[in-house]
Image (cartoon, rainbow, N blue to C red):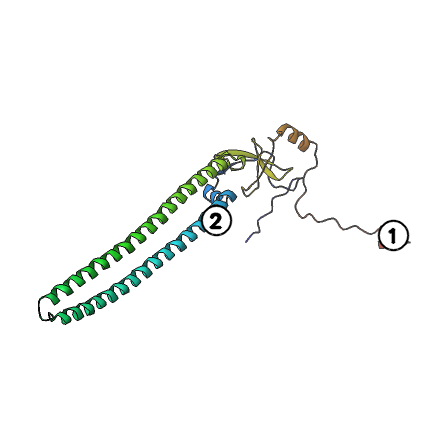
Amino acid sequence: MPVPKKKPLNQFGSPLPLGASRTFEDPGYVPDYASLLANDPEVLAGMAGMHGADIADEAALNETLAAAQRAYTGGVTDLGRQLSRGTAQGDVDLGARGTLASGALAVLRGSLNEAYTRSLNQLGEQRANTERSARQSLASNQAARQMQQMMLEAAARNRLAADPRYQPVPGSSQTAKWNPITNMYHADDGSMYTQGGELVGQGSAPNWGVINSILGSYTAKPGPVNRKLPVPKAPSIFTKGWGG
């Protein structure tokens, strides 16, 4: 199988001739505003403060709910004791009057149970009202902080959008020419690309007249790649002897 020959290099070490053109697709630049916003110092500081307020509010809610439950449990216990004392005292009073066997006992216990149930319901309503008020307060505070967060992020978006570093750059398709002096492709807008098509920088527009004049000053033709140097010959006196 024949070995492919290497292309000879010119005097600038490049196999490409001056002005060889190629089209490049520039995708442009679209800022990642979501990432910029998430790492913005002002947004991070504001979010840290709001997060601390959320933790404090959650702790306050849990304490309020626990206190309401303790009050309810203690109230139920007290009502149970009152019912027991009232029932016992009623039995004593009716027994002293000799009316335990009458309908007065049923009336007394019915009245005591009704009072117990009414008071128990009141305790439940008090607990529910306390919990409802605490949760509404938490929800109101969270809504206020969400609005604060939205305003903070909106201000950061406006600031980032006005920052010259984060202005979007539209993509384009342009043709660049090969410059053997720099070993890069140069576009008319100053963009420079490698042979692999990688954008490596932005300079000034190339002056092809100057480049041609520089290249024209080199008249030496490139030699073959890996050329072997000639082996020097010894003087004939060493090969023919003195008497030759």
In the picture of the structure, the residue carrying the numbered disc 2 is 48
Amino acid beneath label 1: Ile
Residue toward you, 158 or 32? 158
- What residue appears at the point 12 percent right and 63 percent down from the top-left corner? 107
Number of numbered discs overlaid on the protein picture: 2
Say the numbered circle drawn on residue 141.
Answer: none
- What residue appears at the point 16 percent right and 70 percent down from the top-left corner? 91
Whether 222 is drawn above or below 90: the answer is: above
31 with respect to 218 (left or right): left
Q: Position of residue 44 (x, y in %)?
A: 49, 46
Q: Which of the 4 quarters of the picture holds residue 15?
A: top right
Q: Which type of secondary structure does the marked residue at label 1 adopt?
A: helix
Q: List the single residue furthest toward the front.
A: 97
Whether 80 is drawn above or below 193: the answer is: below
Instruction: Name the image quarter holding the N terminus.
Output: bottom right
Q: Position of residue 214 (x, y in %)?
A: 68, 32
Does label 2 or label 1 sit earlier along the sequence? 2
Residue toward you, 209 or 145? 145
Amino acid beneath label 2: Ala
- What residue appears at the point 29 percent right and 60 percent down from the top-left corner? 72
Q: Position of residue 164 (x, y in %)?
A: 53, 34
Q: Disc 2 or disc 1, which is closer to the eye?
A: 2
Q: Residues within 10 Å of mark 1 (few under 14, many from 20)?
A: few
In the picture of the structure, the residue carrying the numbered disc 1 is 237
Q: List the single residue furthest toward the right.
A: 243
